[in-house]
Amino acid sequence: MDITQLDGVTQPGDIMFGVLLPLHLDKVYQKVDYTERPPGTTCTMFHFENYQQFQSILFAVEEINSNPSILSNLTLGFQAYDSCDVLHQDLQGTLELLSGSQTSIPNYRCILEVPLSAVIGPSVSTHSILVAHILGLYRFPQISHFSTSPILSDRTKFPSFFRTVSSDIFQSQGLAQLVLQFGWTWVGLLAVDNDYGQQGIQLVRQALVRAKACVAFSENIITSQPNHNAPHIVDVIKSSTVKVVVAFSPPIDLLPILDEMLKQNITEKMFVASEAWSTSSLFSKGRFSRLLNGTIGLTFYSGTILEFGEFLNNVHPSMTLGRQWAKLFWEEAFNCKFIDANLTGTLENLRSACTGMEDLRSVKNSFNDVSALRATYNVYTAVHVIAKALEDLKSCKDGEGPFPLSKCADILGFKPWQLLHYMKKVRVKLSHGRELYFDQNGDPPAVYDIVNWQLSPEGAVRHVKIGSYDTTASRDQVFTINTSAMLWTTDNQLPPTSVCSETCPAGFRRAAIKGQPMCCFQCIPCPLGEISNHTDSIDCIQCPWDQWPNSEKNKCLQKTIEYLSYEDALGATLTSTSLLSFSVPVVILQFYIKFKITPIVKANNYYLSCLLLVSLSLCFLCSLSFIGYPDFKKCLLRQIAFGLIFAQCISCILAKTIMVVLAFIATKPGSNLRKWTKPTISYVIVLSCTCLQLLLCLTWLCLSPPYSQYNIHVKPGVIIVECNEGSDVAFWAMLGYLFLLATISFIVAFLARRLPDSFNEAQFITFSMVAFLSVWISFIPAYQSAQGKYIVAMEIFAILASSWALVIFMFLPKCLIIWFKPDRNTRAYLMRKC
């Protein structure tokens, strides 16, 4: 055994490879005032897992050297250094590996007959970058088992760098997908302040942003400070509303943060772990169980090494190779201390004395746990990669070599760049059936396990595999996770919720809050006529014109179709009233026919009265054309029928009024108007007035006829089927013409109301016209303010009311006389009145 000043070991061989491995994870932080030479590094925290990795190198070398099919007649040796995770010690170890001695001699190798094939390590990305710059100058192959920074994939800067772990480009995508798998859109980021942490966390951030998630905070673990900036970081975590924190850090650098969280009793946060600490035994102590129980993360895929467990149990302080490290391990494993003969003091001041007789099988720790070898398996694989590349180089046949003139390299005198050629093409079979190879950037296929931290019945933390992230799998199998196998810290065993704003349910849309990230929003109900049929909708969707949102505004329903139908209560009432009203003029007409020879009937123009009664009965009937589904034919005819029938009705009354006036004037001595009192004149008046209305209606029908339409603007959620009058001017002109006829009748009747006559009908016409005009003047504002079927109902009411006014004032007095006072319906009585 050869122990160097840098604390290392050397196993001689015909071909050597170097190892840079941090058996210690921490160092004593010493104040440097730059007034004297900085003190040497004092390493602390001997790590079982990393010592297990060193043992895997011993095991792999023993396997290779004992296998006659690999490097036959040659032995593989190595030179290993404990870098203590310190940058300058990795650098010093690299230079000593190149020189082949305890002293760094640039550009010179002390043992030329023993070539240096490759270097395994370092484990920290920042350290690997520095070493790769140096080894890349000489084209020495370098294989890291733990450095994952994407910078190292740059073949221009690092032409001879390889690794048995995947780049953080893939890990960051996997972590982001893991976060989004459980709907965590509001997360915090925590990263160590080196290339590994900063590059990795930036990739995670980019992946989260692309997936529309938000970062509440991003804090750096400052490794140059003894407390790693833990108080500030924990204050940020404590004050934030996030429930999930993604931590991109080696375990040793995360330790002060977790200690500070325990100190401040912060246990309600959920961690998502990068591969550097997702399976670390550093946190397996019971004091972290409340804090880290339920943690999920990505980790390297696990492998198995046959008979490796028995090999580990044979480690003993008496072993020749690496005895100093074996003693450190033994003291940590059994919590004892080997007594130095030169040590002063008594045994009572020390831990119990180590005897060397302790049984390693009696303890269970991360060193002899071979159930899921991850980083250790990567180191083991790296040794076999070097051996396979050397074997491929050795197996080259003269004349078939890859180098100029088809030459092969000499296995005992090869150049670094010659081995590099074989390293690029090497393929090694792994324990689980996969094959390790390197792409053009020196990266292997990206395969990760997804682990969940669960407490065992004994209170220890177990790293349970719950899924995988395999970029080589089929598209639907790249990311798989068994959520039923997971354990959470919540009481209901459901994933915690980590969102800035609660999910907007269907029927609402998200509205950004000014000055806040996009994940912080408020939920606003969809406006009238719009829906959102899924949660967290950005915009609401307009319903089709014939549909309307339900009360929750999450789906469109068929709108209610509204029109004044016969089945409707209002429609049925108006129909019954119209039919009943229709019978009244018919009954009066029958009485008029029965008593047509009576003086009171004769005195009021019998034939004109019959025509008026027929017109009134049609007025009542025409209201039925306004009830029922307003199809095209009904819309085309109903206003025209109403206008013509009422024009005829008012024309009859106007003719009656004019005939009364003419009859009185014609009775005066010397009057020449007797010829105008003939019945024919009244029919001419009726016909001419009606024809004018007919002409107006025909013009209306020709230029802009009424039509049926769907009105969706009056009532939300209702389709009103109605008749569009085509031309409002024509409609109001038609009504205006009726108003004109009625007004003329009223004026003439009012002026003739006191004329001496046996039965002056003018006063009844005056009352009837007053009622008629009152109804239709009131109709105008009511028509303008009504909506939907009530517009139609309003017009029907006006038709019925005005028709009843004419019936009552024009015929009720005469009917009362005919029915109840027949003594007044005699010529003698009428002549007496004169």
Image (cartoon, helix red, strand yellow):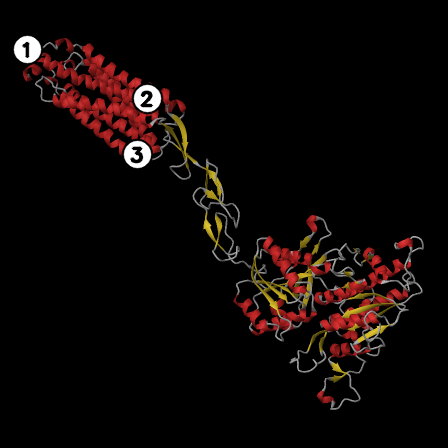
Percent across and percent down for residue 79 are 83, 71
In contact (CB < 8 Å): disc 3 and disc 1 = no
Q: CA distance from mark 2 to mark 1?
A: 45 Å
Percent across and percent down for residue 575 are 32, 27
Percent across and percent down for residue 48 are 74, 72
Compared to 455, does 600 lie above or below? above
- Residue drawn 68% across and 53% down? 479
User: Going from the N terminus, do you reach mark 2 or mark 1 first?
Assistant: 2
Quadrant where the C terminus is found in the figure = top left
Of the pair 183 and 200, the residue shown nearer to us: 200
In the drawing, what numbered circle is on residue 640? 2
Of the pair 344 and 828, the residue shown nearer to us: 344
Percent across and percent down for residue 170 are 69, 56
User: Going from the N terminus, do you reach mark 2 or mark 3 first?
Assistant: 2
Q: Which residue is mark 1?
A: 669
Amino acid type shown at disc 2? Ile
Compared to 254, does 499 lie above or below? above
Of the pair 68 and 109, the residue shown nearer to us: 109
In the drawing, what numbered circle is on residue 784? 3
Compared to 492, does 315 lie above or below? below
Amino acid type shown at disc 3? Gln
Crowd rating for badge 1 (residues with CA inside 10 Å; few <14, some 14–19, many 20+)? few
Label 2 sits on a secondary structure element that is helix
Compared to 188, does 620 lie above or below? above
Q: CA distance from mark 2 to mark 3?
A: 20 Å
Label 3 sits on a secondary structure element that is helix
Residue 831 falls in which quadrant of the image? top left
Crowd rating for badge 3 (residues with CA inside 10 Å; few <14, some 14–19, many 20+)? few
Whether residue 12 sits left or right of residue 535 in the image: it is right
Q: CA distance from mark 3 to mark 1?
A: 53 Å
In contact (CB < 8 Å): disc 2 and disc 3 = no
